[in-house]
Amino acid sequence: MTDSQKSDETAVVANEEEVEASGNNGAGTPAPAENVQADDATAAKDAADANDAADANDAVQAEAPATEPATPAAPRPTPSAAPSPAAFAARPKAPAAVVPAAPAVSAASLAEAAKWGRAEGDGHVFLTLDGEEIAVGQYPGVSTDEALGYFARKFDDVIAQVVLLEHRVESKAPATDMQKTVTHLREQLAERNMVGDIRAAEARLDALSTQIVELEKSEKAAHEAVRANELAAREAIVAEAETIAGQDPAQIQWKTSSARMNELFETWKAAQKSGVRLGRSNEDALWKRFRSARTVFDRHRRAYFSQLDSNNSAAKSAKEALIAEAEALSTSTDWGFAAGEYRRLMDQWKTTPRASRKDDDALWGRFRAAQDVFFSNRQAANDQIDQEYTANLAVKEQLVTEAQALLPINDLNAAKKALQSIRDRWEDAGKVPRADMGRIEAGLRKVEDAVREAEEEKWRRSNPETKARTNSALSQLESAIAGLKEDLEKAEKAGDQRRIKAAREALEARQAWLDQIQRSASDLA
């Protein structure tokens, strides 16, 4: 508020006090206009803010959507009969020296205000409401237009707030305190200290109240939907935590499950911090379930790893015992016995439970190192022996060549005698290098297998039982052939072609069998 506006307000209040003190020309009953002096004083205090309020109104109306329907103009009411001249004469006159400067009023605003009220020459202003005139106050010392414009601007201030509230409702701003604003504006309109279309303003407030109720319902529904989603999200967190906690401790993947449980806890904390409140009962119930699931999970995890540590300790002790045996054997020169012992230790190692990865890898390294020492020593010894056996290899290679010259076996007895001689010299030659042992042994074994097969074949041919079966088959076939020859002669004499054909086919088959058996008998002989 500027200094000039403050001085104007002081002048108006002083003027009203002088008018009130002067009475009504000595009459015992005050004039009707004086009944609104208190309202005029309140209105005068608001005069300094009239320009700012009007500017705010213009700004809000400029921001309002262009498609907003204008409030229909109410029919101009018919004013009631004006007060009597005696009543107006009784009203005190304000001194001209204390009249403040009135704010400028546009012609359009004055024209609109004139529909709903009027001003008199002494500054008294009346509102026409429902066909009746109501005194709203006095603005003395100014023109009637200025006095009417002042009270019209008070109405415009209220309308500016109505428009602002309508804009908030249309944009679906939060409905908090909107109903309080409607109530406050109703109370301002009910004071009847302004000029304008009061009923239209009240109707707009009624419409706003209804819209605000719907907006509140919509906000509540949206809030409930968000709350339901948040509740479902929290339920999902708890359900997953309970699922993780309910797994078999012997089968659970602890690293993955622990990480996931921590993620769920962080998600819960974030929801607690910035999510929608679910109500104390829901929050407490869900938290108890979530906390219980985490407690069970942690208890299972501690028990599992405690047992795992115990198992690791037992496995570590068992494998350290195997390592001690392996290290004791690593310097042995009893190559056959020690190699067998290492095979036994390896079998036991495979059946021993695993320790932790770190410990098991270290233990295996020690066990393998002991083996490597032994087998390296054995290989060095074998290499030395192989050098000593190189001369024996040349002798045995010559014996293999001599043995293979016996193939194929034509004279079994001579081949057996020669092979026995080769065997005797083979044993006298001694050992050969390990790398050549298989090749040399295979060369001699081929000749030995050929001699053995020749002996078996000779036995089959000289077997008395085989000869007896062959002679019996020969006798049976010869008897059958003789019978078939007689049948063929009879059929030829009878001229029976069918019997002739059958007899010839049977005779030919028996003759083929006889020839085959005779050749076998010849081989046996």
Image (cartoon, rainbow, N blue to C red):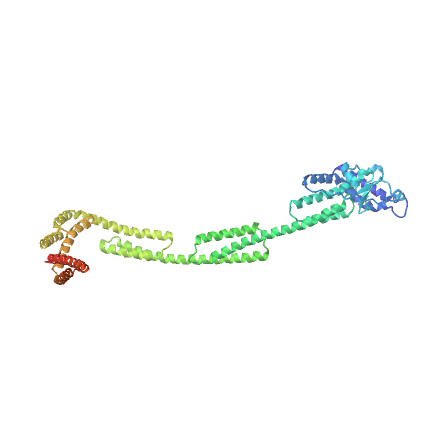
Q: Quadrant of the N terminus?
A: top right
* 90 left or right, relative to 357: right
Question: Is 83 in front, or is 322?
Answer: 83
Q: Position of residue 208 (x, y in %)?
A: 70, 48
* 509 left or right, relative to 314: left
Query: In this rendering, does residue 34 appear at all?
Result: yes
Q: How many marks?
A: 0
Q: Position of residue 90 (x, y in %)?
A: 89, 43
Residue 144, compared with residue 523, is above or below; it is: above
Query: In this rendering, does residue 9 appear at all?
Result: no
Q: Position of residue 293 (x, y in %)?
A: 50, 57
Q: Position of residue 218 (x, y in %)?
A: 63, 50
Q: Residue at x 57, y 57 (%)?
A: 282
Q: Quadrant of residue 309?
A: bottom left
Question: Is 161 in front, or is 524?
Answer: 524
Q: Quadrant of the C terminus?
A: bottom left
Q: Quadrant of residue 321?
A: bottom left
Q: Residue at x 53, y 58 (%)?
A: 289
Residue 145, compared with residue 419, is above or below; it is: above
